[in-house]
Image: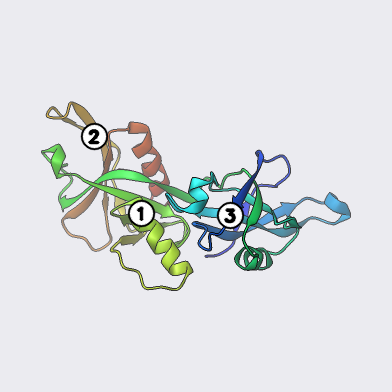
Amino acid sequence: PAPGRCAPGGGGGRTYEVDFQTEKKLGMLLERHDEWCPSGAGGQAGRLKECTLVKLVVEHGAADVKGVTVGSRVLAVNGEDCTNRPYLETLKLVKTTPRPMRVVLQEGKLADDECVSGYCLLRKSVGPIPPSQFATWKRRYFVLGGAVANKNVLQVYKSKRDYEHVVVSLFERRPIAVKLKAYKLSPSFSISAMRSVRYPEVGANVFYFTLMTPGAKLKMIKFGNDNADAIRDLHGHVTRFTGVGR
C-alpha cells in the first residue's frame, strides 16, 4: 500500500512495552507512514520522516493477547532506537531480532479516513425495499480502505477473521483462501439517503442505505445496522466517494 500520514510522535499516547518470548508470528502488520517534522525541529528544515506504525492486529494473535493496539508507533526493538530508523530497517529488525524480543511502542491512531471497518447487516436484492424479515439480513464485516486497499475501495467479508486472513496472506505472499467482494467507489455509484425499517419479531429498528453499482439494472446492496450512529458513519464515508445521498 502507498505510504500514509501519521500525526507527530511527540505528544502522542502512553508508551508501553511488549515482550515476545518465542513467537515468530507476531500477529500484527507494520506499515510505513510519513511524519511531518516542522521547520526548526532538531535544527533541520521542515521535512517528511518515515515512522513505523501498527496497521493491523490479528484477533487472538500474539500481539492482540499482549495488548498491542492499532495505530501504535514502534519506538524501539530490544533497546535499538527506531524513532529515526527507516521503515524497512525497522521491519527487518523486528523480523530478525532473536527472541525474547522487547518492543517499545507509543499509542496513537491512524488518520480517520484511512480505514473504516466493522460489522453490518447486508442484503443484495432487486429494488430499494429492505428485507421483510430480520433473519433475511446477513451479518458481514466491511472495510473501507484498510491495509490492502485504497481509501475508496469498500470490501465485504464474512468475518473480521477473513479480512485478517487476506491481509496476512498478501503480506506473506500466500494464496487467498477466502471469498470477498470489493467495490471501487466512484461518482458512478448511486447511493440513497438513510432510511429505517421496524422488525417487530426482534423488537428492533434497522437503519440502512442502498448502494447501486455502475451498470446494475435492478439489484441494490443494502447496508444496515441496528446502531444508527454506526451505519450513519459508514454512509457518510461512502458518500465522500459516491456523491450526495439521494
Residue 136, image quadrant: top left
At label 1, the amino acid type is Arg
Q: Is residue 188 above or below residue 70?
A: below
Q: In this view, does 32 lie to the left or right of 171?
A: right
In the image, which is nearer the foreground, mark 1 or mark 2? 1
Number of residues whose C-alpha sits closer than 10 Å to that of mark 3, classed few (under 14), some (14–19) or many (20 or more): some
Q: Report helix, strand or loop for mark 3.
A: strand
Q: Report helix, strand or loop for mark 2.
A: strand
Number of residues whose C-alpha sits closer than 10 Å to that of mark 2, classed few (under 14), some (14–19) or many (20 or more): some
Q: Report helix, strand or loop for mark 1.
A: helix
Q: What residue appears at the point 83 percent right and 56 percent down from the top-left corner?
A: 45
* Residue 162 coordinates in the image, percent (x, y): 34, 57
In the image, which is nearer the foreground, mark 3 or mark 1? 3
At label 3, the amino acid type is Phe
Q: In this view, does 7 lie above or below 184?
A: above
Q: Mark 3 points at which residue?
A: 20
- The mark that comes first in sequence, 1 or 2, is 1
**Towards the viewer: 76 or 226:** 76
- The mark that comes first in sequence, 3 or 1, is 3
The circle on residue 206 is 2
